[in-house]
Image (cartoon, rainbow, N blue to C red):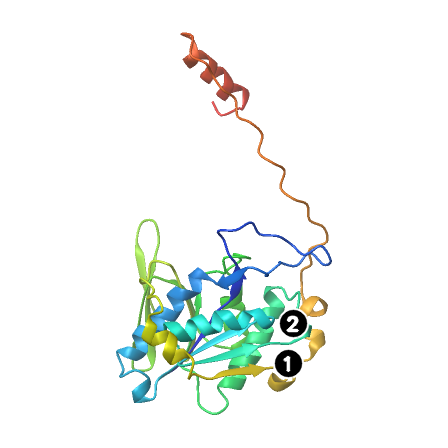
């Protein structure tokens, strides 16, 4: 089984996030592997381990698109257990929106499937920076593959992928033929952490760097030039103002009701 997992290098959600002053793109100076992508990586590892792992010829390829720093997301994926990594890196990719990103990633997936077919492309349910959830569906459309989104359980049986999708009142079981694109939720598993053995093993694993020329994409189709959307202006969020303090002098309930009524919350 050959699985490609899309992993993204995103700003650390524990820190303040900023836009670049020059072009209103995300500042990725302090970035990490997107937490939501770890669930997709864990799902891929569980699938190949149930089939004999890498020793039986199964592959989990961590694919990331981004600048030089994005290789750190790939390195962590290798430490967790991915068998190899691929870094799509090209200056022309800077500023790509979801549409341009999906175009480039689709070309990279096709390139990686040229020697042997790709069975599954797995993603998180969203990235923790843009949080659009657009790329998995766009990727499936560009690859002309079945898509299953927001899977909370996942299995492969022969030539089919079987997924469970939960809602507030029920769940659906969805089947699709392979190859397919599947996005998974953060309810699907508990991602493993890199251990000492995995960190050492990762040093011997291969990271391949691809450019747009390698995957046959015209630079005009990606980046700001090829994006369908653009951030024209941005402003810092204003600081929070102090809240209203009610001192109870026997009429706190009345004050509270008056305040809620004034805010049209009653």
Q: Locate residue 41, reporting x and y percent.
A: 39, 70
Q: Locate residue 87, reporting x and y percent.
A: 54, 77
Q: Tell me: residue 1, above or below residue 140.
A: below
Give the residue at the far top of this rendering.
Answer: 250
Q: Residue at x 54, y 19 (%)?
A: 262
Residue 181 visible in this rendered orientation of the protein: no
Task: Find residue 147 and name its label.
Answer: none
Disc nearer the start of the sequence (2/1): 2
Count residues near mark 2 (Cα–Cα under 10 Å), then give few for <14, some for 14-19, many for 20+: many
Does residue 205 appear to the left or right of 168 in the view shown?
Answer: right
Q: Of helix, strand and loop, which one carries label 2?
A: helix
Q: Tell me: residue 241, above or below residue 16.
A: above
* 192 vs 163, nearest the viewer: 192
Count residues near mark 1 (Cα–Cα under 10 Å), then give few for <14, some for 14-19, many for 20+: some
Residue corresponding to mark 2: 93
Q: Quadrant of the rendered structure where residue 35 is?
A: bottom left
Q: Locate residue 238, reporting x and y percent.
A: 63, 38
Residue corresponding to mark 1: 212
Q: Quadrant of the N terminus?
A: bottom left
Q: Residue at x 65, y 54 (%)?
A: 19
Does residue 136 appear to the left or right of 215 in the view shown?
Answer: left
Q: Of helix, strand and loop, which one carries label 1?
A: helix
* 102 vs 159, nearest the viewer: 102
Determine whether label 2 and label 1 are within 8 Å by CB.
yes
Task: Determine the CA span between mark 2 and mark 1.
Answer: 8 Å
């Amino acid at each position: 089984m050959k699985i490609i997992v899309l992993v993204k290098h995103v700003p650390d959600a524990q820190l303040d996030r900023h836009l670049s002053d020059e072009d209103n793109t995300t500042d990725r100076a302090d970035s990490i592997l997107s937490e939501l992508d770890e669930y997709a990586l864990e799902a891929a590892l569980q699938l190949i381990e149930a089939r004999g792992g890498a020793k039986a010829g199964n592959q989990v390829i961590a694919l990331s698109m981004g600048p030089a720093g994005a290789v750190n997301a790939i390195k962590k994926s290798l430490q967790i257990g991915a068998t190899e990594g691929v870094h799509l890196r090209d200056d022309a990719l800077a500023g790509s929106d979801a549409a341009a990103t999906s175009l480039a990633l689709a070309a990279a997936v096709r390139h990686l499937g040229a020697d042997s077919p790709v069975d599954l492309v797995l993603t998180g349910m969203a990235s923790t920076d843009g949080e659009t959830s657009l790329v998995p569906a766009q990727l499936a459309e560009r690859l002309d593959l079945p898509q299953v989104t927001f899977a909370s359980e996942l299995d492969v049986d022969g030539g089919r992928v079987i997924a469970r999708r939960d809602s507030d009142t029920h769940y659906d079981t969805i089947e699709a033929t392979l190859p397919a694109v599947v996005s998974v939720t953060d309810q699907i598993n508990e991602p493993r952490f890199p251990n000492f053995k995995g960190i050492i093993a990762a040093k011997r694993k291969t990271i391949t760097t691809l450019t747009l020329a390698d995957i046959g994409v015209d630079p005009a189709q990606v980046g700001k030039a090829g994006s369908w959307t653009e951030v024209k202006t941005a402003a810092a969020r204003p600081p929070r103002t102090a809240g209203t303090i009610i001192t109870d002098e026997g009429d706190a309930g009345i004050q509270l009701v008056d305040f809620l009524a004034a805010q049209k919350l009653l």
